[in-house]
Amino acid sequence: MTEFTEVAERVWVARYEWFDVNVTLVGGDRGLLAVDTHASALAARGVLDDVRRLGAGEVVGVVNTHEHFDHTFGNGMFRSAYGQIPIHAHETAAARTLEAAERIKGLYRDDPSDPHRDEVLETEVVVADTTFSSAVSLDLGDRAVELVHPGRGHTGGDLVVRVPDVDVLLAGDLVEESAAPGFGGDCYPLEWPLALDIVLGLTTSSTVVVPGHGAPVTRDFVEEQRNAIGIVAETIRDLATRGVPVDQALEVGDWPYLREVLGHAVRRGYEQLPRSQKRLPLI
């Protein structure tokens, strides 16, 4: 059992131990919008129990902040509980959900020791069916909720959810509080700082920012994380421009995060740099 905590008027966040992932409910007089649905059908069943225990109403829509399984694998359970409710996502995230799901199921299939293996493999993947490209407003009756794609960062299909009447922004994994940013094999490290510039433009000094993982944070936290990711991006550019080979970049660079979490970021950054910004290493 996990309690939903009200972080602003009719905005509740539940923080789940597995992945330290957040599920958020935004309430309007038409019902609740659920933002992210956890990492398996079984896990989502527990989320639904917590939603019912809160007693704030019925879920009338779901938002996936991106395609990763810890944010989408509960979609089917929410549909089972509340009918054919719309599931919203950025168009790129929706297009990549099945591919991302197969990749993660393959990893769990190859690791019989993982205690969550069976529940992940047994989860039916339900892809978002209501998509947008840039921004869209959702009508909850007495409240409008904005979905904005600020650019590519953690993935190619990140979105943030803005609840303007109470100055809350749900940032998905563009912002993480409980660990270093998620530089995975599908990240865009060179563009991530620019996406966070857009996110910062949607906030004020009083905004409550809910990250994809961990405790709510302030605008100052987001700015600090943006600057650290910016250092990652500029370090990649600098090393590539100086002709440092990609397989030496981690050791050569002066990084704001542990090298152990930056392998994908460096490789992806080198791949994404235009040819004009790369220099062949001297022999």
Image: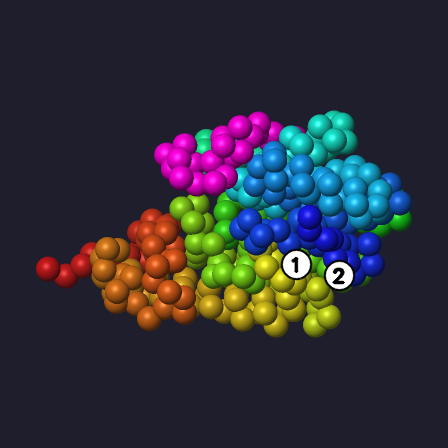
Q: Residue at x 14, y 61 (%)?
A: 282
Q: Quadrant of the C terminus?
A: bottom left
Is residue 121 magenta-colored?
Answer: yes
Residue 132 horizontal/vertical position (percent): 65, 39
Q: Residue at x 58, y 66 (%)?
A: 222
- Position of residue 244 relative to residue 264, above or below, is below
Residue nearest the observer in this picture, 39 or 134: 39
Residue nearest the observer in this picture, 130 or 102: 102
Marks 2 & 1, CB-CB < 8 Å contact: yes
Q: Is residue 77 visible?
A: yes
Q: Is residue 194 left or right of residue 267?
A: right
Residue 254: image quadrant is: bottom left
Helix, strand or loop at mark 1 = strand
Q: Earlier in the sequence, mark 2 or mark 1?
A: 2
Which label was assigned to residue 157? none
Helix, strand or loop at mark 2 = strand
Q: How many numbered callouts?
A: 2
Q: Which residue is mark 1?
A: 210
Q: Is residue 199 visible?
A: no
Residue 111 horizontal/vertical position (percent): 38, 37
Residue nearest the observer in this picture, 141 or 281: 141
Give the extent of the magenta segment: 108-133
Q: Is residue 263 left or right of residue 58?
A: left
Q: Residue at x 37, y 65 (%)?
A: 258
Q: Distance of mark 2 from mark 1, alpha carbons? A: 9 Å
Q: Amino acid at mark 1?
A: Val
Q: Is residue 239 left or right of residue 30?
A: left
Which label was assigned to residue 7? 2
